[in-house]
Image (cartoon, rainbow, N blue to C red):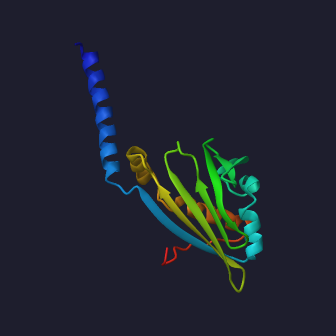
Amino acid sequence: MDDLGFWILVSVGIVLGAMLLIVIAGSFMSRSHKVTRAITLKQTPDAVWAVLVDFVNSPSWHSELAKVERMPDRNGHEVWKEIDKSNYGMFLETMEATPTTRLVRALVDDKGPFTGRWEFGIAPTETGCRLTITESGEIGNPFFRFIFRLTQKPEYYVELYLKELAKKFQESATVEAPRDG
């Protein structure tokens, strides 16, 4: 074997070894996470609800989204495909919708690297309402789990969504982590 062949084998071995270590490390990390965050807005529950369920217009205020498309219903529930700025699409099924108080959306892409659901709760306050989002997620693949945990905090997307929603209403957002969440 010549020097070039030796170094190619060493390089391939290093890459495969690193990938194996990542998978092993990811196997010891928790598959699931649960994150709850909330904001208080000076909007009525009706106004917040109207924006939350106007899925097709979400890209007009949510900077991460490029477009949203209506898909065929699944089990009698609405399904929407959200496509982000990097052209990654996620299929979200509306599992529950109780106007002005509760919305539950689940990720229904069985071939994706993760699964999960968002539960939105809207409660009236003296000056508007409080919106609470709880994300329950799971990352089955240990490789993706390791990369996700290395590069992101589980609360990132919930907090981003709440901040973007507050901006939509031209309000500043103080994102809170409720003690019971």
From the viewer's perspective, is 178 left or right of 24?
A: right
Depth check: 127 or 106 in front? 106
Q: Residue furthest left?
A: 1
Q: Residue furthest bottom?
A: 126
Q: Residue at x 63, y 52 (%)?
A: 92
Q: Residue at x 43, y 49 (%)?
A: 140
Residue 81, x across and y down, in percent: 67, 47
Up/down of 152 relative to 111, above or below: below
- In the rendered image, is residue 170 in sight? no
From the viewer's perspective, is 154 left or right of 39?
A: left
Q: Residue at x 39, y 44 (%)?
A: 143
From the viewer's perspective, is 76 left or right of 36?
A: right
Q: Residue furthest front?
A: 75
For residue 19, what is the image quadrant?
top left
- In the rendered image, is residue 91 in sight? yes
Residue 155, x across and y down, in percent: 51, 62
Depth check: 98 or 68 in front? 98
Q: Residue at x 22, y 13 (%)?
A: 1
Depth check: 50 or 167 in front? 50
For residue 88, what is the image quadrant?
top right
Residue 107, x across and y down, in percent: 58, 53
Up/down of 98 relative to 4, above or below: below
The mark tally for this picture is 0
Residue 106, x across and y down, in percent: 59, 56
